[in-house]
Amino acid sequence: MEIGVNVPNFGPGTDPATLRAWAQTVEGLGFDLLMMSDHVAVTPDVAEQYPAPFYEPFTTLSWLAGITDRIRLGTTVVVAPYRHPLVLARMSSNLNELSGGRFILGVGVGWAREEFAALGVPFERRGRLTDEALQTLREVWQDENDYGSKRIPIWVGGNSDAALRRAMRFGDAWHMLRFTPAWMRAAVAKLPETGAPALAPRIALRLTDKPVLGEDRLAGEGTLDQIAEDIAELRALGAESLLLDPFNGDPQETLRPEAAWKALATVADLRKDLQ
């Protein structure tokens, strides 16, 4: 199972030097993936959780492609309705070519009503717009003379039944986001026996000295033993890729990335023991 990191591309502590350090740290620790999120307009509903500055993922990942060698790069997740499907197809294929085939396109429907309004995109049609975008991507990417021959994996994000259906129809993987272990077990249990997409979950990463108890504990929260159990269970449930999200909701965390790097180094050592 490959393991990656969701790198914060927003917040008061984020700048080019910090993003470079994140990339060098994540790749240097031996992780397989480096992914980041997507917003275009930092409207009040976005700023409440992901304040400015917000570094646009395609631009930022293209830059990071030039200062990394091995690690795969991706979005978790790009909001498909924010861009015309042909623009999304072009940016994705160009980034994939420029990175030597290292790009993964994680896609979601979005949630920020004010951002949708600012961009002139109807919030109520976001599901249908996402389906149309994914259909367009699959069609235009068949033109290898224009879009290149390196296949781009599509991870469909979201925890809903609609997201699962979308992943089965268009995706290479179902990219469920921040959940409890019990929810994951139930989600896997309802997968069809045939035709199910690969599993590529994104979980929290919050390392604590004492066990985190309760049914609402997110996978990836707790002691090192709890996190080790979560990773082992996800692998046993069939996850082929796993993304760790060290951002736990306080934008001030971006001013102190060393704490996240320390937790990631601990997990990197744990990973060696699990292999």
Image (cartoon, rainbow, N blue to C red):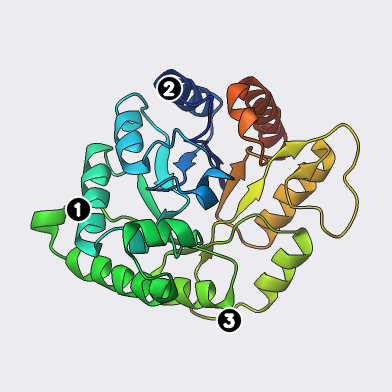
Which SS class for mark 3? loop
Tell me where residue 62 appears, x and y as whole percent.
29, 35
**CB atoms of marks 1 and 2 within 8 Å:** no
Judge whether residue 196 can be spotted in this image. no
Q: What residue type is labelled 2?
A: Arg
Residue at the (21%, 71%) spot, across then down: 139
For the residue carrying disc 3, how many other residues have a C-alpha within 10 Å: few (<14), some (14-19), or many (20+)? Answer: few
193 over 4 or under it: above or below = below
Which SS class for mark 1? helix
Return the disc, 1 or 3, that comes first in the chain's sequence: 1
Tell me where residue 46 appears, x and y as whole percent.
51, 49
107 over 5 or under it: above or below = below
Disc sitting over residue 90 in the figure: 1
Which SS class for mark 2? helix
Instruction: From the viewer's side, name the closer residue of 137 and 216.
Output: 216
Judge whether residue 65 can be spotted in this image. yes
Residue at the (52%, 23%) spot, across then down: 25
Report whether 105 appears left or right of 273.
left
Residue at the (40%, 41%) spot, across then down: 73
Q: Which amino acid does label 1 sit on?
A: Arg
Tell me where residue 118 appears, x and y as whole percent.
37, 56
For the residue carrying disc 1, how many other residues have a C-alpha within 10 Å: few (<14), some (14-19), or many (20+)? Answer: some
Instruction: From the viewer's side, name the closer residue of 112 and 133.
Output: 112
Return the disc, 1 or 2, that comes first in the chain's sequence: 2
Disc sitting over residue 192 in the figure: 3
**CB atoms of marks 1 and 3 within 8 Å:** no
Q: Which amino acid does label 3 sit on?
A: Pro
On-image quarter of the C terminus: top right
Q: In which quarter of the image is residue 208?
A: top right
125 over 44 or under it: above or below = below
Disc sitting over residue 20 in the figure: 2
